Image (cartoon, rainbow, N blue to C red):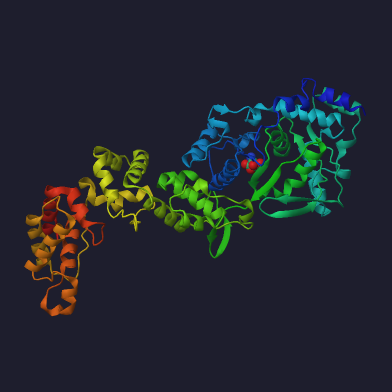
């Protein structure tokens, strides 16, 4: 058969060749060792935590090496697409500081010289490469109907053979030019298949960036390159796009490992150098003592919007994911408490091969540490930013007096041992409800060792004594004075020496004041709280307390 006649018959409208595209998208001028990576989701509007993980690894590999990170949208499967499905993904990435250099930067905006980065706009490019393969006798049209393909599959199942279109099952491999021409004239739909040069007794091997060397049987299946509508399959689009976008490292989910033999064969058939591959194991969840993949259907935490809604600080989420990727991130953080996470050198070969276990408790702990390392102003800004969208009532209260709001977060923010009371912004409301009068609805936790009468007397007397703005030592002296006046020891030590001589000690006095103004037995810096609330509010709360207990 004359293959150029065939390619002209199949692709009369395609005039460009792969060479034209190589000129249009020349090798990138990047320093030696710079990696070019991409995140390539379908526009489903949904960013899975595993997607964020993969995007983070790709982004790190690119930016750590002075390379380029792209966001390409793989919209060849129209069934998976949702309206405005790109913006959900971009928002998810941006919310966590993963910013692509090229590709999509908004629903309708792309940047970069290697585009378009939307596969459905690249049909002509794929077809130029497909035409070239037909020209070389390495691809052919297949007119088999879905029923015919299904019956081939059935037969193969019965015979316990490898499924797929190959060997004696590949009927259309041997059609003559005339038969093909006839079918096309009749308007019969067809797919374009690779004429696989593989043989069943050969094996391929490649070096995976995460798993090391992997060996597999060579591909022998005549896989589909272009579907009946001329749109490529994942395999073909991957080979063409990653070639023309000059991707150096394809970092993707490990569900693609089994397709690597197809991909390597495709690159070989096209006379192209394949990229390096790294396959990421999925994020797992513990369930009933076993492990399963974290699932969009079952687990709210599978979607990255969950982290935004809950108000986990983005730095915390990223640091947690870096921890999942490389467990030595924890040592890095310990040794460099002030460093940016971007200073950590992520290594792909240290990543888990079997799938790391997702642990919300650990995420929460990491977020607590992250928040504890920030200044009160940073914490307040981030909490307010979150509340603006997710808790308007809290936002309004904080926004009314930002300086007051900042004060809350400054309690016990001692640089040596900062208080770690919040791990996500949705905890601010509960943690600090007593600082906002409209949110203060106390259910008093009462100290058991003190009688109600004593509590009332202590509280009422304190309402008279309290002077806002006093220095902390001076303030504590007044609490000690009150202890003495009420028959409690001024010092804990004193009380311990002779417990029968006192009703209790100064700590009990603080407890009563604390419970009266916060409703709780535990709070940060009582002196700070009293000063922030001010005399009128403290007095009002004490009256409320003595009436309600
Ligand atoms: N669209 C593919 C997916 O979502 C991309 C895989 C890849 O990164 O090549 O699985």
**Which quarter of the rendered picture does the N terminus lie within?**
top right
Ligand 1 sits in which quadrant? top right
Is residue 480 rendered to the left or right of residue 16? Answer: left
Identify the residue shown where x is 14% and y is 53%.
Answer: 470
Q: Is residue 380 visible from the viewing direction of this image?
A: yes
Q: Is residue 282 above or below residue 266?
A: below
Residue 103, position in %: x, y? 59, 31
Front residue of 300/19: it is 19
- The C terminus lies in quadrant: bottom left
Q: Residue at x 85, y 45 (%)?
A: 198
Rendered position, 315 above or below 416: above
Direction front: furthest residue: 31
Q: Considering depth in this image, is 187 or 498 the residue closer to the camera? A: 498
Q: In the image, residue 341 lies at what x, y percent?
A: 49, 48
Residue 490: x and y, percent?
13, 69
Left or right of residue 271: residue 177: right
Q: Which of 342/455 is in front?
A: 342
Residue depicted at x 70% and y 50%: 208
Residue 144 seen from this side: no
In this rendering, position of residue 139 left or right of residue 514: right
What count of labels does the image hold?
0
Rendered location of residue 114, percent (x, y): 65, 29
């Amino acid at each position: 058969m004359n293959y150029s006649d065939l390619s002209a018959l199949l692709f009369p409208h395609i005039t460009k060749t792969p060479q034209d595209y190589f000129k249009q998208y020349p090798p990138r001028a990047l320093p030696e060792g710079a990696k070019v990576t991409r995140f390539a989701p379908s526009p489903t509007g949904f960013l899975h935590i595993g997607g964020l993980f993969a995007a983070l690894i790709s982004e790190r590999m690119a930016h750590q090496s002075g390379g380029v990170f792209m966001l390409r949208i793989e919209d060849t499967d129209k069934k998976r697409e949702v309206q405005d499905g790109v913006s959900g993904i971009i928002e998810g990435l941006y919310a966590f500081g993963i910013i692509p250099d090229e590709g999509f930067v908004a629903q309708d905006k792309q940047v970069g010289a290697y585009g378009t980065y939307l596969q459905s706009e690249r049909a002509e490019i794929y077809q130029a490469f497909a035409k070239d393969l037909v020209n070389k006798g390495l691809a052919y049209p297949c007119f088999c109907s879905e029923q015919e393909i299904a019956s081939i599959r059935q037969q193969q199942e019965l015979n316990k053979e490898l499924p797929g279109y190959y060997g004696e099952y590949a009927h259309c491999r041997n059609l003559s030019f005339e038969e093909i021409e006839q079918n096309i004239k009749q308007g019969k739909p067809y797919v374009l298949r690779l004429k696989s040069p593989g043989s069943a007794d050969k094996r391929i091997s490649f070096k995976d960036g995460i798993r090391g060397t992997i060996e597999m049987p060579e591909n022998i299946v005549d896989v589909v390159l272009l579907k009946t509508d001329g749109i490529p399959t994942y395999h073909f689009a991957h080979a063409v796009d990653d070639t023309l976008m000059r991707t150096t490292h394809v970092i993707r989910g490990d569900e693609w490992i089994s397709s690597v033999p197809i991909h390597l064969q495709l690159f070989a058939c096209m006379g192209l150098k394949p990229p390096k591959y790294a396959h990421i194991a999925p994020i797992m969840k513990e369930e009933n003592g076993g492990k399963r993949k974290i699932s969009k259907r079952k687990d709210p935490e599978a979607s990255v919007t969950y982290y935004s809604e809950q108000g986990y600080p983005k730095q915390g989420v990223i640091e947690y994911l870096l921890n999942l990727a490389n467990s030595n991130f924890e040592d890095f953080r310990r040794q460099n408490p002030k460093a940016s996470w971007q200073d950590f050198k992520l290594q792909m070969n240290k990543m888990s091969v079997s799938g790391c276990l997702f642990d919300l408790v650990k995420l929460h702990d990491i977020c607590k540490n992250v928040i504890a390392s920030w200044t009160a102003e940073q914490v307040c800004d981030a909490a307010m930013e979150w509340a603006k969208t997710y808790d308007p009532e809290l936002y309004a209260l904080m926004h009314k007096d930002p300086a007051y709001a900042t004060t809350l977060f400054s309690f016990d923010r001692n640089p040596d041992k900062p208080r770690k009371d919040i791990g996500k912004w949705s905890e601010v409301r509960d943690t600090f409800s007593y600082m906002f009068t409209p949110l203060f609805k106390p259910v008093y936790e009462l100290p058991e060792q003190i009688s109600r009468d004593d509590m009332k007397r202590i509280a009422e007397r304190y309402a008279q004594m309290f002077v806002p703005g006093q220095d902390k030592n001076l303030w504590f002296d007044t609490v000690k004075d009150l202890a003495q006046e009420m028959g409690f020891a001024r010092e804990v030590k004193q009380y311990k020496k002779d417990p029968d001589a006192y009703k209790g000690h100064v700590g009990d006095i603080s407890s009563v004041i604390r419970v009266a103004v916060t409703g709780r037995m535990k709070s940060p810096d009582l002196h700070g709280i009293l000063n922030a609330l001010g005399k009128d509010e403290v007095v009002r709360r004490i009256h409320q307390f003595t009436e309600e207990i």
